[in-house]
Image (spheres, coloured by chain):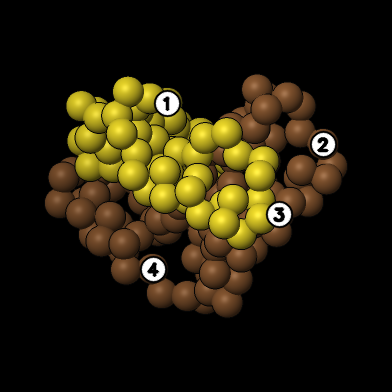
Chain colours: A brown, B yellow
């Protein structure tokens, strides 16, 4: 069993109201560390056995078509240790 | 400028309908690699300068109170390279 992580974030040039809401809420709670916040999605996909190159290519394809919207989002596929 | 990443996932014992919807959609699109899918949130927090231990303690506190619901979610704070 291995876990593949797909991270989906809005592109930098796309407005991120969720991230802005978090960035606005932090100082109200007394937290002053944040200059900017972006919010995205994280998928943990469990696969059987060790991931093969074909499987990772398939996951890339799924990340492009189902998990992200390539017009406004970027994605990153990582194999978790 | 450094980026701190906070990853928030539902606890394993909590039902994850979003993840189940993705897991159900994958085979319909011809992808058969996934045994299970969990969906969570990912926050990218930009901070000025290098993160200090006090700043990281503050971010932990914000992750507990604002970014996650500790009753049903777990969080992980990572400093991005």
**Foreground of the two, A66 or B55:** A66
Q: In which quarter of the image is residue A25?
A: bottom left
Q: Which of marks 4 and 2 is nearer the N terminus?
A: 4
Q: Name the residue under label 4.
A: A16
Marks 3 and 4, how far apart in space? 24 Å
Marks 3 and 2, how far apart in space? 12 Å
**Foreground of the two, A45 or A6:** A45
Q: Which mark is residue B53?
A: 1
How many residues crowd around disc 4 within 10 Å: few (fewer than 14), some, or many (20 or more)?
some
Marks 1 and 4, how far apart in space? 28 Å
Q: Residue at x 33, y 44 (%)?
A: B17
Residue A75 makes an appearance in the image: no
Q: Residue A50 carries which label?
A: none
For label 4, the SS is: loop
Q: Name the residue under label 2.
A: A52
Q: Residue A60 carries which label?
A: 3
Q: Residue reaching furthest left? A: A28
């Amino acid at each position: 069993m291995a876990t593949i992580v797909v991270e989906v974030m809005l592109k930098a040039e796309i407005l991120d109201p969720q991230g802005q809401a978090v960035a606005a809420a932090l100082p109200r709670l007394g937290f002053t560390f944040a200059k900017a916040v972006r919010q995205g999605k994280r998928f943990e996909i469990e696969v059987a056995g060790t991931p093969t190159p074909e499987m990772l290519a398939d996951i890339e394809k799924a990340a492009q078509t189902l998990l992200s919207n390539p017009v406004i989002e970027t994605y990153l596929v990582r194999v978790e240790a």
